[in-house]
Image (spheres, coloured by chain):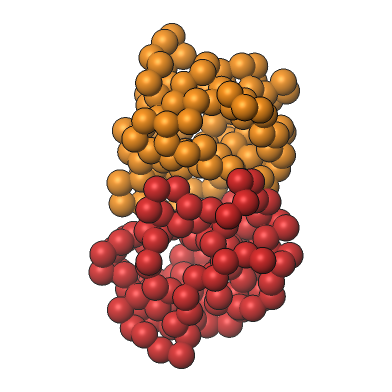
Chain colours: A orange, B red
Amino acid sequence: MADTRNIWDALDSFSEHWSPRRLASINDYDVKVFKAQGEFTWHSHPDTDELFLVLAGELVIQLRDGDVVLGPGDVHVVPRGVEHCPRADDEVHALLIEPRGTVNTGDTPSERTAEVRELG
Amino acid sequence: MADTRNIWDALDSFSEHWSPRRLASINDYDVKVFKAQGEFTWHSHPDTDELFLVLAGELVIQLRDGDVVLGPGDVHVVPRGVEHCPRADDEVHALLIEPRGTVNTGDTPSERTAEVRELG
């Protein structure tokens, strides 16, 4: 992995939605960037919190008791075990922090399950 | 801690240099914001990597074998045990990710040692 990465260059390098790319690793945690549009899938991560940081656009994190709406610069942590379903009505670019090996669909594997990919 | 935090609002809320504020926590890791100007102090973190993400300005991470120059959007991870000394010729705003309890001056405590502070 390159010693230094630029977030904006990383985002320019791919176009797929809901397919996170590893930007950096710190100890056994990954910092990933992703693009999204449309609705993801309801899931939870029984063993870990998940941090979202929106870089561009608006990301709605649907929770069972209401929506959290995140704009650029907004950071929200979904606690472990909490069911959530991200949604982006228009394209959103965001950053994720979670332990290495965390699967995007958590406890609900589906055709949306995607291994984290390396940047080109 | 608030459920959702905005990075830019967080940065607007304080002015001290080299005094990180906790923006969010994920499991036992902290995401902190800080402002810096001038030279910090040479130190290393024997037990953890440290991730820097520059939000505004230019941060120079001096290493024993050369400088790493980071601009907005640049991410760099200083591996555990690697001596480094951050420097900002003009004010820089940046984000840090590291395990909870990581001390800013690492193995070299000094008058620059600062506990992470909570945002107001």
Q: Quadrant of the C terminus of chain A?
A: top left
Residue at the limit of the structure toward the front, as seen here:
A65
Residue A57, position in %: x, y?
72, 33
Residue B68, position in %: x, y?
46, 65
Q: Is residue B83 left or right of residue B61?
A: left
Q: Residue at x 30, y 61 (%)?
A: B48
Q: Is residue A99 above or below residue B70?
A: above
Residue B8, position in %: x, y?
71, 56
Q: Residue at x 66, y 28 (%)?
A: A66
Q: How many marks?
A: 0
Residue at the limit of the structure toward the top, as seen here:
A111
Of residues B86 and B64, the one drawn nearer to the viewer in this rendering: B86
Residue B89 is at least partly visible in this image: no
Q: Residue at x 50, y 56 (%)?
A: B31
Of residues B85 and A101, the one drawn nearer to the viewer in this rendering: A101
Q: Is residue B69 above or below residue A59?
A: below
Residue A34 is at least partly visible in this image: yes
Q: Quadrant of the N terminus of chain A?
A: top left
Q: Residue at x 31, y 51 (%)?
A: A27
Of residues A36 and A46, the one drawn nearer to the viewer in this rendering: A46
